[in-house]
Amino acid sequence: MQETIFDTKKPLKKVKNWKNFLDKWQSLSESRITGIKIANNQFDKYCIDTYGKTQDEIIEHVKTYDVDERDDLMTDLVQDFINFFRKTHVVPVIRGKISGINKYLKYRKVGVDTQELVYPQTLREEPHALTIDEIHKIFKVAKWHKQAYYLALISTGARPVEIIGLRVKDITWNQERRCYVALIPAYLTKKKLARTTRFSTEVTPYLNRILGNLKNETDLVFTKNSNLKYARSNEGVVFKSYCEKVGLDKKFETTGRMKVNLYCFRGYFFTNALGALSDSKDMAHALIGHGAYIQEYQRRTLPEKLDLWEEVESSVLVFDLEKKNHEIKKLKEAKALLIQNNLEKKDIEDQLKTERQARMQFEKEIKQTLAKLREEKLSNFTH
C-alpha cells in the first residue's frame, strides 16, 4: 500500500483546549498573542464573577443547545461583556478584546457574528501637541541615556519599539553626510516592512558614546533589556515619572491615560515634517512608516532618502538653536523674496494691463477718426 501523509502515530485530531489553541496561533507576533491571552483571561474572570462558571464551562454548557439557541446565548453573553467593559475602556480597545475572545470561541465552535454586536459610540480625544518648551522641561530631569532615546524618537518619528529594538548591526555611520543611519528591521515595524531612517546631528554625540561602549553587533543600543515588550513598557513608566516631575501629568478624561507620552515625539516629528515637506506630504507619512506610503519611499536610493531627511532635520532639532534659527531665517528671507517677486510681478501685470487698455483706447479713437474722415469725404463727393 502506498504511504500517505496520514500514516503517522501522531493523532490527526487534537483536543480543543486552551493550550492547543495557543499553539495554533504561535505564528502571530508576541504582542498579539499576549493581547489574546489578556482578553480571554478577562472574559474568563467576567464569566466566573457573573455566572460562577469559567469560560470553558459555559462553552460546554452552551454546546448542549441547538445551533440557533447556541448563537443567541453566546451573542448575548459577549454583548453583556461589551456593556460591562464600556465603562472603563475605549471602543478600539474593546474591539481588540472581542477579536481575541472570538478567535477562541470560533476554535471551540461557538463563535459569534460580530456584525450583530453593538459597540458604544467612539469618543476621540484631541491628541496633545508637544511644544519645544515641554521637551526642554522633560530633558532637564531625564537621565543622559534616556535623552539619547528621546532625541532618537524626535529625529526619526519612529515608534518607540522601533528604536528601543535597534541593535549595533542596524546602525551605520554615513561618512559623506556625517550622520548615523539605521535600518529598522521588519520585525520591529507595525506593517512588517523594513525601512531606512536617519538620526539628526543632535543624536550623534550620544551614539558615539553608546556605540563606543558596546562590543557585539547584536547588543541592543538603547536598552539592556532583551525582552522588548518589557523594555518598551518600562520606558513608558520612566517617561511618565519625568512628566509628573515637571507638571506634564494631565490625563484624558475618557481613558485616564497621560496626554504627554512617548508617542507625542512621533507626532512632533510628523507635524514638523509636514511643514518642511509641504510639496511632498506623502513623504512625511513614509518617513514615519505609514504603510500606505512606504512603498514609494522604499524605491528611492539611499542618497535620495537622506536628501529627504535633510529637508526635515532643521525643523525637528531640539537644542541646536543656532542652526535652527539660521534655517528659519533662510525660510523667512525666501518667503520675503517670494512676496517681493509676487508684488513685482503684480506691478508688471498691472502696468501691462494699463498699457493694453491705453492701446485699445487709442486704436478705438483712430478707428473713430478714420470713420469720420470717410464720412466727410463721401459727403463731399456726393455734393
Image (spheres, rainbow, N blue to C red):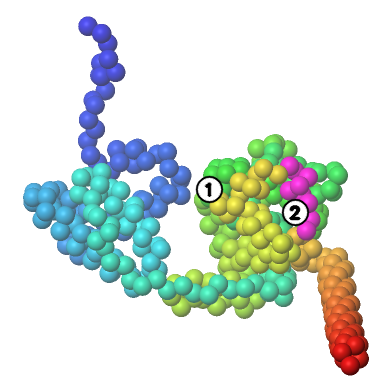
Instruction: Say which label, 1 or 2, has the lower sequence index.
Output: 1
- For the residues labelled 1 and 2, the Cα–Cα distance comes to 22 Å
Q: Give left or right: position of 240 versus 99.
A: right
Q: Which residue is mark 2?
A: 308
Element marked by disc 2: helix
**Quarter holding residue 94:** bottom left
Q: Is residue 122 magenta?
A: no
Q: Who is closer to the viewer here, 41 or 154?
A: 154
Q: Residues within 10 Å of mark 1 (few under 14, many from 20)?
A: few
Q: Is residue 355 above or below residue 36?
A: below
* Residue at 58% in and 54% down: 290
Quadrant that contains the N terminus: top left
Q: Give left or right: position of 17 versus 360.
A: left
* Residue at 33% in and 71% down: 120
Is residue 328 shown to the viewer in this render?
yes
Is residue 239 shown to the viewer in this render?
no
Q: Is residue 374 above or below residue 145?
A: below
Classified by dominant secondary structure, the portion drawn in magenta counts as helix
* Residue at 58% in and 67% down: 261
* Residue at 34% in and 38% down: 24
Q: Amino acid at mark 1?
A: Lys
Please provide percent x and percent y for residue 85: 32, 68
Q: Which residue is mark 1?
A: 191
Q: Who is closer to the viewer here, 284 or 366?
A: 366
| Residue range (magenta) | 301-311
Q: Who is closer to the viewer here, 71 or 146?
A: 71
**Quarter holding residue 243:** bottom right
Quadrant that contains the C terminus: bottom right
